[in-house]
Amino acid sequence: LLPILSPLRPCSVSSSSKTAMPPKGSKKADGAAKDLPGAAPVKKSSTKKKRQSYGSFIYKILKQVHKKMRITEQAMQIMESCVIDTFERLASESSNLMRISGRDTLTMKEVQSAVRLVLPGELARHALTEGTKAVMELQNHKG
């Protein structure tokens, strides 16, 4: 499994350790550049980079299998690592198969072969069945 670098949710800070922040309209919050004549105001970076997560999908599958079961944050991180690791292995094997066959396009054939090579026995068969079903559903939905 991959090492877990950061938790899914940021740690909460207790209210006693928070410092008092000035109101949004005050000069201290707007930056020093605004105080200087002729200087352009400092723009704040308000956009946070979204971290892609498989947590919602893992949770939905858990509820399909065991309706009353819950999952801890640490267990969710372990499941995330497992999903990411499996995806990377499948992508790497698919890429190798493309390179060997001399193709530039990843097709369903390379992905199916990668699944057969990476996943063991019955798990590979189930993955192929579900994958084929998903592709057929997508093709029917497109028209």
Image (spheres, rainbow, N blue to C red):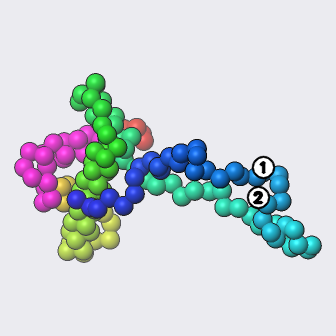
Task: Using the rendered view, name the quadrant where residue 49 is placed.
Answer: bottom right
The answer to whether one can see residue 55 in this image is: yes
Q: Which amino acid does label 1 sit on?
A: Pro
Q: Is residue 45 above or below residue 66?
A: below
Q: Is residue 9 left or right of 15 when viewed as pictured?
A: left
Q: Nearer the viewer, residue 92 or 1?
A: 1
Q: Is residue 104 above or below residue 76?
A: below
C-alpha span from label 2 to label 1? 7 Å
Asked if the residue under mark 1 is in contact with the one under mark 2, i.e. CB atoms within 8 Å, the reply is: yes
Q: Which of marks 2 and 1 is nearer the N terminus?
A: 1
| Residue named by callout 1 | 23
Magenta stretch: dominant secondary structure? helix
Q: Is residue 129 left or right of 33 when viewed as pictured?
A: left
x, y (%) of residue 54? Answer: 36, 47
| Residue named by callout 2 | 29
The answer to whether one can see residue 94 in this image is: no
Secondary structure under tag 1 reads: loop
x, y (%) of residue 111? Answer: 23, 57
Q: Does the magenta stretch include residue 127?
A: yes
Count of numbered circles in the view: 2
Task: Using the rendered view, name the quadrant where residue 86 is placed.
Answer: bottom left
Q: Which amino acid does label 2 sit on?
A: Ala
Picture residue at 61% right of the left edge, 50% below the top: 18
Q: In this view, does 20 lie above or below 103?
A: above
Secondary structure under tag 2 reads: helix
Q: Does the magenta stretch include residue 54?
A: no
Q: What stretch is highlighted in magenta?
A: 116-139
Picture residue at 30% right of the left edge, 37% below the top: 71
Task: Using the rendered view, name the quadrant where residue 84 is placed.
Answer: bottom left
Picture residue at 46% right of the left edge, 55% below the top: 51
